[in-house]
């Protein structure tokens, strides 16, 4: 419409619908103020969209820069406490949360106010599952669900929380890979969604719209699922070339449909099928179906405009490096159980995979990690109390000395401190009269582990790890063994154990033990 003049209270508008036969109408029911308000609102909407686009582009760039190595989402493991420990070890690794159900997020946010424009939240639950540590990013929030309406509500809650600064995730990941019967069976999401790629595309668009495009949407899936007509069997699974090609083409159709609208460009793929039509536990689904890394390698070649991260069966940095050598265009590797079982074995991640010089790595030894984690834990216990949260903190840090002599004693000491916290709660001991968690874990480490172990650098630890792995496999590497033995010999000097302070030979780090009540 074109304004041709003004009436008493509103402009006279001509609708352009074909030359001389245009129809002249009046919009007198709107005042001049109405048009000014509409114009101002339109300008604000345009500015908001521009700002959202800038945020989304920055998040997408952050995701691409950090995707080379990532911590897989694991229920009951990758909570904010374990993510904080991983970030202390590696400054570059992309972190994933444990899966959070969309229904739960939607339920915790309630619209109030004029025209239902404001949210109120039950913060205790949201902090438990959505809370982030102070140094956590880059980090991806994984969501599970299959109802577009509920995912939209969850996305709106997340958007409101992000706008008020409650969290700052790098991206949102839709779970299309969990084979658990509670998720893929009764819950009808997780790996079950791979049977309906059009629904997955709808769900990702819903999340994109709900968050106003400010967060990239990614998908974690498997290479496929079994079916009722053809349940999984080790003896008959893909025994012919035709069956193997059919499996790959089915995976390609899933990728094509989900990525068709351009919203999803990033996939994390577990290189096994999900067995849903047999009584397979998640543990069996992680081990029995064979790994097929070559299918992800083919995807990388066939979809060069998309980003793929390989997941499943990778337990060490050398294995990750091997996959990058086999498929140089592969963008990322995702590791789960190995991170939780032996986190320190990945202390060289920033140097080996991201090219950070050793002297610039922020992680120097496990004493430094314990000190930093202890400060974080003290703050958490001050908010949540030691009775409620100490077991979670212990679970996060208990694997830090896995494989080391007396590492089990360290874990036993942590269990004892958890019992102490429970006893303090039953006795009603005030928090300011309880020993600090930071003092307790340092005491457990110094009393049970040698100074050599505590102050060993990531480079030394990695050399030892390689030597032990090759010893287990029957291989030999004279240079690694010789270097490790020479390095160890240089550090072997007498240590005065009568003092309450232990100093590592040939190292400036001093481990001070605080006396705990």
Image: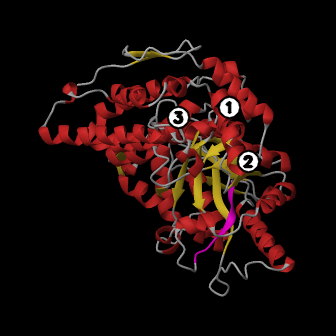
Residue 42, quarter of picture:
top right
Marks 1/2 in contact by CB < 8 Å: the verdict is no
Query: Measured along the vertical axis of the image, is residue 280 above or below residue 39?
Result: below
Q: Is the magenta stretch mostly helix, strand or loop?
A: strand
Q: Is residue 229 above or below residue 213?
A: below
The secondary element bearing badge 2 is classed as helix
Q: Return the residue found at the far front.
A: 494
Residue 381 left/right relative to 27: left
Label 1 to label 3: alpha-carbon separation: 15 Å
* Labelled disc at residue 136: 3
Q: In this view, does 499 lie to the left or right of 404?
A: left
The picture places residue 45, in percent across and down from the top left corner, at: 58, 41
Residue for point 63% across, 38% down = 346
Q: Name the residue furthest bottom.
A: 229
- In the rendered image, which residue does mark 2 sit on? 319
Image x and y of residue 452, in percent:
54, 24
Image-quadrant location for residue 226 = bottom right
Q: What element carries label 3?
A: loop
Residue displayed at 67% across by 36% down: 62
Q: Give the left or right position of residue 311, taking residue 241 as reference.
A: left
Closer to the eye: label 1 or 3: 1
Disc 3 crowd, CA 10 A, few/some/many (<14, 14-19, 20+)? many
- Does residue 473 show up? yes
Question: If the image is split into quadrants, where does the C terminus sit?
Answer: top left
Q: Which of marks 1 and 2 is nearer the N terminus?
A: 2
Apparent side of residue 482 relative to residue 101 in the rendered image (left or right): right
Q: How far apart are marks 1 and 2 (CA)?
A: 15 Å
Question: Percent position (x, y) of residue 150?
Answer: 47, 62
Question: Which element is circle 1 on?
Answer: helix
The answer to whether residue 355 is visible is no
Residue at which label 1 appears = 350
Residue appearing at x 45%, y 49% in the figure: 157
């Amino acid at each position: 419409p074109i304004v041709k003049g003004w009436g008493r209270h509103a402009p006279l508008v001509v609708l352009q619908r074909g030359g001389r036969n245009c129809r002249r109408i009046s919009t007198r029911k709107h005042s001049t103020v109405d048009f000014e308000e509409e114009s101002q609102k339109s300008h604000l909407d345009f500015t908001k969209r521009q700002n959202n686009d800038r945020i989304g582009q920055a998040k997408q760039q952050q995701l691409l820069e950090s995707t080379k190595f990532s911590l897989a989402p694991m229920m009951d493991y990758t909570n904010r406490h374990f993510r904080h420990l991983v970030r202390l070890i590696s400054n570059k690794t992309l972190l994933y949360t444990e899966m959070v159900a969309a229904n739960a997020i939607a339920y915790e946010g309630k619209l109030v106010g004029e025209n239902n424009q404001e949210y109120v939240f039950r913060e205790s639950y949201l902090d438990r599952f959505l809370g982030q540590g102070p140094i956590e990013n880059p980090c991806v929030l994984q969501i599970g669900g299959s109802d577009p309406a509920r995912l939209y509500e969850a996305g709106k809650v997340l958007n409101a929380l992000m706008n008020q600064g409650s969290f700052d995730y790098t991206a949102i990941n839709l779970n299309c890979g969990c084979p658990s019967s509670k998720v893929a069976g009764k819950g009808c999401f997780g790996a079950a969604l791979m049977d309906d790629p059009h629904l997955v595309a709808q769900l990702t668009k819903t999340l994109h719209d709900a968050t106003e495009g400010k967060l990239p949407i990614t998908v974690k899936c498997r290479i496929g699922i079994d079916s009722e007509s053809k349940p999984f069997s080790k003896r008959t699974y893909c025994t012919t070339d035709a069956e193997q090609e059919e499996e790959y083409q089915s995976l390609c159709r899933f990728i094509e449909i989900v990525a068709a609208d351009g919203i999803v460009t990033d996939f994390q793929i577990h290189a096994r099928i999900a067995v849903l039509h047999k009584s397979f536990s998640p543990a069996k689904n992680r081990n029995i179906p064979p790994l097929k890394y070559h299918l992800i390698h083919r995807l990388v070649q066939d979809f060069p405009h998309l980003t793929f991260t390989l997941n499943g069966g990778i337990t060490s940095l050398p294995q990750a490096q091997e996959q990058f050598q086999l498929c140089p265009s592969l963008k990322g590797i995702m590791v789960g159980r190995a991170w939780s079982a032996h986190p320190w074995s990945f202390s060289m991640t920033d140097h080996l995979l991201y090219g950070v010089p050793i002297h610039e790595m922020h992680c120097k030894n496990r004493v430094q990690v314990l000190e930093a984690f202890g400060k974080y834990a003290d703050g958490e216990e001050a908010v949540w109390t030691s009775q409620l949260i100490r077991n979670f903190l212990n679970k996060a840090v208990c694997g830090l000395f896995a494989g080391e002599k007396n590492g089990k004693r360290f874990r036993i000491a942590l269990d004892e401190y958890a019992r102490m916290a429970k006893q303090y709660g039953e006795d009603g001991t005030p928090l300011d009269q309880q020993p600090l968690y930071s003092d307790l874990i340092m005491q457990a480490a110094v009393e049970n582990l040698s100074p050599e172990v505590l102050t060993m650098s990531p480079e030394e630890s990695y050399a030892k790890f390689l030597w032990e792995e090759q010893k287990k496999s029957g291989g030999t590497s004279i240079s690694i063994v010789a270097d490790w033995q020479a390095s160890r010999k240089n550090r072997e000097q007498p240590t005065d154990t009568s003092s309450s302070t232990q100093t590592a030979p040939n190292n400036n780090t001093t481990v001070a033990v605080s006396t705990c009540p």
